[in-house]
Amino acid sequence: MNPTARWTAGLAAAAVLATVGAAAGYASLLLAAVVPLLYLAYGVLSTADADVTLRANRVVEPATVPPGQTVSVTLTVENVGANPLPDVRVVDTVPEALGVIDDSPRAGTALEPGDTLQVEYGVVAKRGDHRFGRPHARVRSFGAGAAADRTVAAAGDDRLRCRLDASAPPIEQEGDRFAGGMPTDSPGQGLEFHSTRPYQRDDPASRIDWRHYAKRDELTTVNYRERHASSVVLVVDARPASRVVAGPARPTAVELAAYAATHALEDLLGTGHEVGVAVVGADGPDAAGLHWLAPGPGHDRRARARDLLAAATETTADEPEVDPETQASRVATLAPPRAQLVLFSPLLDGWPVETVEAWGVRDYSRVVLSPDVLTHNTATGQFETVRRHTRLVNCQAAGARAVDWSRATPLYVVLEAAFAADARGALTGGSS
């Protein structure tokens, strides 16, 4: 237990009164010096018990999350000793890469034996494996004349995992995947009604229009819109212009783009499509500096694609400069004919619009999914928001399906809009 300077003023006052009283021969001043001396004695003698016993438990909920999600952290500190603690102050050790956005990791109160102190706060997840340190506690004596510092071992959760393939609750609660086969104009078997035709002897009974038969005594067969697998290339804009954040300690637009691309990858592969990945703006092994994985099926491709998307989030400012226009042209050269190109970009400059227009010249079907990382409470942020919305409209005017991903919208809703069933061009090679 270390003494503090809390009673230095009392000691000085007592010394001054005693000195003046002795020099002047005033007994009243000598008597007055007794008062601060009593307070000083109380502060010195009222030390806290050196055997302070605290127990801590931390709960991180949820412990595995995607980038950008708010995570609640609850630290509970209990006085398991036999003596009351008049002043306990606790601060949790938050990982350096994470920022606290709700409440505070600090708290203080008095604790009787068996009482607990709860520290509740929220952090924003960023990609990586983040480990919490031991909480720090400072215990003061009754007179606050001494203090003891402790590091407390915390049971429970000690880390937060932020992964691109982690599912936020809205995605897990959504029962169906957003992407089935891409739609065509060809009638056949499927789920969406297309047309009817006269019954043929080899048609299954499940496709007979029994209602029509009951009304007109004619057998007809129902055709559904067929869905076929197609080739899709997921393109992540990882240029320096896109490595921006919506606020302190929040994930970058590249992290959000890679997160959305990862979930699109999982669902598209899960429904039979051939999926490829390209990362534009980073220095890759390709001749044009492109990170590229050709479209294809299978579990091995899923793992390789995840690695490429993770690499997109790890780009740094000291990487060699690359030409994104050359890389975008390279994507169009490597992509299979009639493939669908999906660009994940925050649309903070004119390059994505020019890229979408250039891909349209080659008759590719195009989709643009844009995470919103701009601030809207400043004049500059509002101005940039208008410019970004103009770029979204320009992408649509160029024949692409442009989807705005606002921070309040669950990802599965955005993916549902990006891969809507009415995009005929997704299979035919035209504009969606």
Image (cartoon, grey):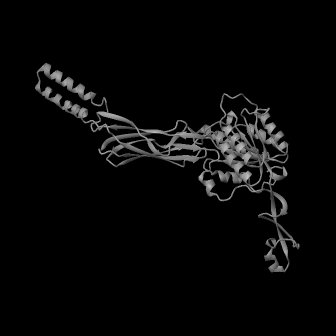
| Most foreground residue, 282 or 153 | 153
Above or below: residue 186 compared with residue 201: above
| Most foreground residue, 249 or 91 | 91
Above or below: residue 65 compared with residue 96: below
Say whether residue 236 is left or right of residue 430.
left
Q: Residue at x 71, y 41 (%)?
A: 236
Q: Residue at x 72, y 46 (%)?
A: 302
Q: Residue furthest top?
A: 23
Kindly indicate the quadrant of the structure image that contains residue 282.
top right
Kindly indicate the quadrant of the structure image that contains residue 276.
top right
| Most foreground residue, 344 or 87 | 87
Say whether residue 188 is left or right of residue 7.
right
Q: Residue 226, image x and y in percent?
A: 81, 60
Above or below: residue 189 compared with residue 265: below
Kindly indicate the quadrant of the structure image that contains residue 141.
top left
Say whether residue 331 is left or right of residue 244.
right
Q: Residue 43, image x and y in percent?
A: 25, 33
Q: Residue 427, image x and y in percent?
A: 82, 52
Q: Residue 163, image x and y in percent?
A: 62, 44
Q: Report the number of discs.
A: 0
Residue 124 seen by the camera: no
Residue 21 seen by the camera: yes
Q: Quadrant of the N terminus?
A: top left
| Most foreground residue, 391 or 273 | 273
